[in-house]
Image (spheres, rainbow, N blue to C red):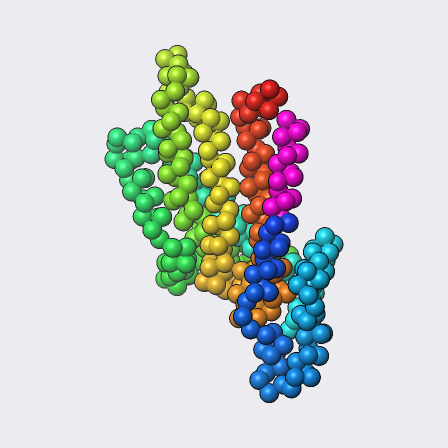
Amino acid sequence: MLRGLLLRLGILLASLAAASLVIFWITQALPGDVARVMLGDGASPAQLAAKRAELGTDRPFFVQYGAWVAGLLHADFGTSWYSTLPVTSLIAPRAAVTAWLVGGGLTVAVAVAVPLGAVAALRRRRLTGFVVSAGAQVGMAIPAFWAGILLSMLFAVQLRWLPANGYVPPGRDLLGWAQHLVLPVIALGLVQAAVLIRYVRSSFLDVLGEDYYRTARSIGWTRGAALWRHGLRNAALSLVTVIGLQVSALIVGAIVIERVFVLPGIGSLLLDSVSQFDLAIVRGVVMILATVVLVVNGLVDMAYVVIDPRLRHQERA
């Protein structure tokens, strides 16, 4: 088991190294000259050369890449080309906003998808199961930003129960922080729940055909109790896989939701930096997002060994 975990850790580190190289190469290959963008078309060749030397963009590719990676190893993402502030200081407070949004959205998605997916499986030939499956189909067709707009129009504009946009740090006003995150979290979570419901339903349907489920039913367990007691653990493997894959979709959805609800998250910082051609921030943000996705998928891969005892026996063999 330890050997398998170390192998997966090595794959994760190699993936992070490859991701860093790809991210740096793509940002370097983007058309445009940041020195000319910052100084304008009227800048002289000497001024442009001085600005490139100041930013370090006149150095060879692998020299720039090596310096960037060396900084990453010390949690130093460099300096913003426009504000001259450390990129880490710009990302940290915004990353907390996005983390709350993604974490809350994932919690809502799982809390909604697991029970409704079980209902859709148990009552697949009844009206209840049909309604749940149809609702999931409709939810999958609704973009996250559209769900956010609808929720904002209903609960913020019409009912005036919750704020339509903005953000308050939890250290300043805990109640205000929660109120500002309710609508974005629900909008993000419900859209992802619609996707998860179909996978949960499919996993539970497989369980309903297994011998251990029929045995539990034969000794007097109800359908729901047998499914929850014996089926949830067996369906957990595919559920964990889908949740790991959905993290990427949650992050992309969070970037859009942050724009809809004017949240100062990492997605908004990324879009603003792209428009300003501040590649130092763009590289830092994209590297963080790629790291989160790779780490989550690596943890999911490691979780297989914990969830499924058969994999542990195979690795020992």
Q: Which of 224 and 55 is in front in this view?
A: 55
Vertically, is 96 above or below 52?
A: above
Q: Taking 249 as reference, is 214 left or right? A: left
Name the residue: 46% across, 23% down. 229
Vertically, is 201 above or below 274?
A: above
Q: Taking 166 as reference, is 131 left or right? A: left
Q: Which of 88 and 106 is in front in this view?
A: 88
Name the residue: 65% across, 84% down. 45
- Quadrant where the N terminus sits is top right
Query: Looking at the rendering, which quadrant does residue 286 occupy?
Result: bottom right
The range drawn in magenta is 1-16
Task: Give percent across and percent down for residue 63.
Answer: 71, 62
Name the residue: 71% across, 74% down. 53
Query: Looking at the rendering, which quadrant does residue 78 occupy?
Result: bottom right
Task: Give percent across and percent down for residue 46.
Answer: 69, 84
| Residue that lies at the very extreme toward the top in this rendered image | 219
Vertically, is 204 above or below 187?
A: above
Vertically, is 298 above or below 79?
A: above
- Quadrant where the C terminus sits is top right
Task: Give percent across and percent down for residue 207.
Answer: 39, 25
